[in-house]
Amino acid sequence: MTYTQPGVYVEERGQPLLDATDRAIIQATQEGLPRVARPYRAVAEQVGVSAEDVMARMRRMLVSGVIRRIAAVPNHYALGYRANGMSVWNVPDDEVRELGPRVGALAFVSHCYHRPRHLPRWPYNLFAMVHGRGRAEVDAHVAEIARLLGDADRGHAVLYSTRILKKTGLRIGS
């Protein structure tokens, strides 16, 4: 990727990765989509393009990896989920690509990802964030993950959150 002029980055094939309209869409949505009946229309009016163009551009940015995902982000605490446990798993490296999506698909797992081990102190390579109304519920969910993993579970632990940190993704300026 090459920088050509303010706000324009070019892929190897010479096509702009982001143009000024893409940047405006990102800036208009980086705090979340507007909470209105037609959020893409609201963004379109703010940016000066059609709602269809906003959706097409966001779809393209999603496919290219500029945008990682478009999803609702619930406030777990406001919904009564007070216990948050990052479950960490030691699974065979040659099975992590198959097992990760299965764990991530569980309703009580908000995100799941593969991370490198740091032997000998840290043998875990699969991480899954589990939410529950209390620690007992999280523990029950972790037991369910252990059953799903079966013999592939070569050890695991749960790291509980002790405080809430403000979470925001990467932000781009104007």
Image (tube, helix red, strand yellow):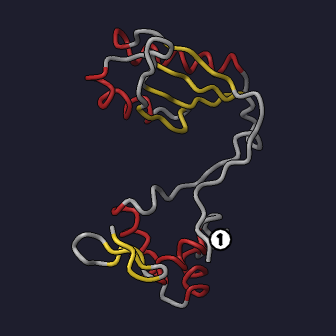
Position of residue 65 relative to residue 125, above or below, is below
**Nearer to us in this view, 115 or 31:** 115
Position of residue 140 relative to residue 107, above or below, is above
Q: Estimate the x, y position of residue 72 in percent, counting from the top left.
A: 58, 54
Left or right: residue 148 versus residue 79 is left
Residue beneath the point at 41% across and 75% down: 18
Query: Label 1, on which residue?
Result: 34
Position of residue 33 relative to residue 133, above or below, is below
**Nearer to us in this view, 97 or 170:** 170
Q: How many marks?
A: 1
Label 1's element? loop
Q: Estimate the x, y position of residue 40 in percent, counting from the top left.
A: 54, 76
**Nearer to us in this view, 39 or 29:** 29
Name the image quarter holding residue 129. Answer: top right
Left or right: residue 5 versus residue 137 is left
Tell me the amino acid under the disc marked 1.
Answer: Pro
Name the image quarter holding residue 96. Answer: top left
Q: In the rendered view of the protein, which quadrant contains the C terminus?
A: bottom right
Residue beneath the point at 56% across and 21% down: 141
Q: Estimate the x, y position of residue 133 in percent, counting from the top left.
A: 72, 28
Position of residue 12 relative to residue 123, above or below, is below
